[in-house]
Image (tube, rainbow, N blue to C red):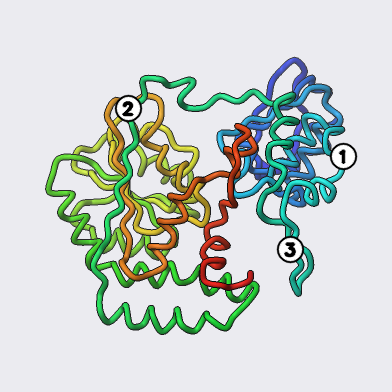
Amino acid sequence: GTRTRRLERGCSYIINWDILTYWQDALAEHGFECIIGDEAQAIGNPETKRALAFRHLAAVIPECIVMSGTPARSRPAQFWTMVSCVEPQMFPTYKAYLWRYTRPTATQWGIQFNGARNVRELHAKLVSVMLRRTKEDVMKDLPPKILDVVPLEADAGALAEYESEESSIADLQGIEARERLANLTRTAYMVKEKALLNWVRCFMEGEEKLLLFAWHRDVVDRLCEELAEFKPAKIYGGVALQQREREKERFMGDPECRLMVCNIQSGGTGIDGFQNVCCNVAFAEFAETSTDMEQAEDRLHRGGQERPVSVYYLIASGTIDEDMAEALDEKKKVLASVLDGKQASDLDLIANIAARRGLRL
């Protein structure tokens, strides 16, 4: 909760990121010996209240550990907060870090720090404070993950509307161009909805369960309504924790519930157990970073999975879906470049697609 109380000495405490700011002063005064930040990508933006609170606590508590399977969702800029908590003197100022390890670009709204550079140097510095373990290191017997891109036939009427919307973006720049480009993914869903529903129904003729992801909340609702005959479970933002658990348990324990529809952001992290009952995941829409996609896929491709995992990208031919699938398939890898010392490109899919189309964001 948000109301503080007296904490007992000699105990360890677990707190949610969302209420950290309310407890900041009480935790700082308690005399803890160590602070651990799990899923520390939550403080990737150093200007958020939770990041400021955690940095303050890391400064007054003697030992600090941060843990994450995805420490940077899209670019090296998101590493700084975590490193500054563990080793404050390595990169003393955020601005100097950005100028050294990102690609600053002047826009009419000021300097934007995207992209990646000097990644080998950054990796060489990080290895002194970082313990890196890949899935291949720790789960050598994990079955393979197989990607299948499924092109779907476009609905003629919806495609005409899509093409009209797409053509209107050509003369836009900046934030408006980015927003309109991102909105195209929503329109692209309508182009393929009929074919996508047919694909799901064909899949459900078998015996397997299916985990189906979408990006927009209203698309999650539409999928559940259109596929009501399969009694789908549903998880998206705003669902109460108790209801979320009931939906999860229904998908895992009810043999009649063979379909789970999730929002990528809400259902793509923090859920374990699906791998025990399912080995098939499909995407009706795509996230804006490959990291979000990988995390969603790994609800199934994780410890305890005994069968190969099939990942289906359901794309509408002739739309932005094809760009998204291509961008996801390119060598990923800001994350790999910084963590493993490999060269890479930016992971922001919308920025990637904008560059292909000659748009400046």
The answer to whether 61 is drawn above or below residue 172 in the figure is: above
Q: Residues within 10 Å of mark 2 (few under 14, many from 20)?
A: some
Q: Which amino acid lies under the numbered mark 3 shown in the image of this protein? A: Thr
Query: Is 150 or 9 nearer to us in this picture?
Result: 150
Q: Which mark is residue 105?
A: 3
- Quadrant of res 184: bottom left
Give x and y (percent) for residue 222. Answer: 32, 65
Q: Which mark is residue 136?
A: none
Number of numbered discs? 3
Q: Earlier in the sequence, mark 3 or mark 1?
A: 1
Q: Residue at x 36, y 62 (%)?
A: 221
Q: Which amino acid lies under the numbered mark 1 shown in the image of this protein? A: Pro
Give x and y (percent) for residue 84. Answer: 79, 36
Q: Earlier in the sequence, mark 3 or mark 2?
A: 3
Task: Quarter of the image for the N terminus: give it.
Answer: top right
Say whether marks 3 and 1 touch (CB < 8 Å): no
Query: Is 208 or 188 nearer to us in this picture?
Result: 188
Residue placed under numbered mark 2 in the picture = 143
- Quadrant of res 56: top right
Task: Quarter of the image for the C terminus: give it.
Answer: bottom right
Helix, strand or loop at disc 3? strand
Q: Which amino acid lies under the numbered mark 2 shown in the image of this protein? A: Pro
Say whether marks 3 and 2 touch (CB < 8 Å): no
Real-space Cα distance between discs 1 and 2?
Answer: 42 Å
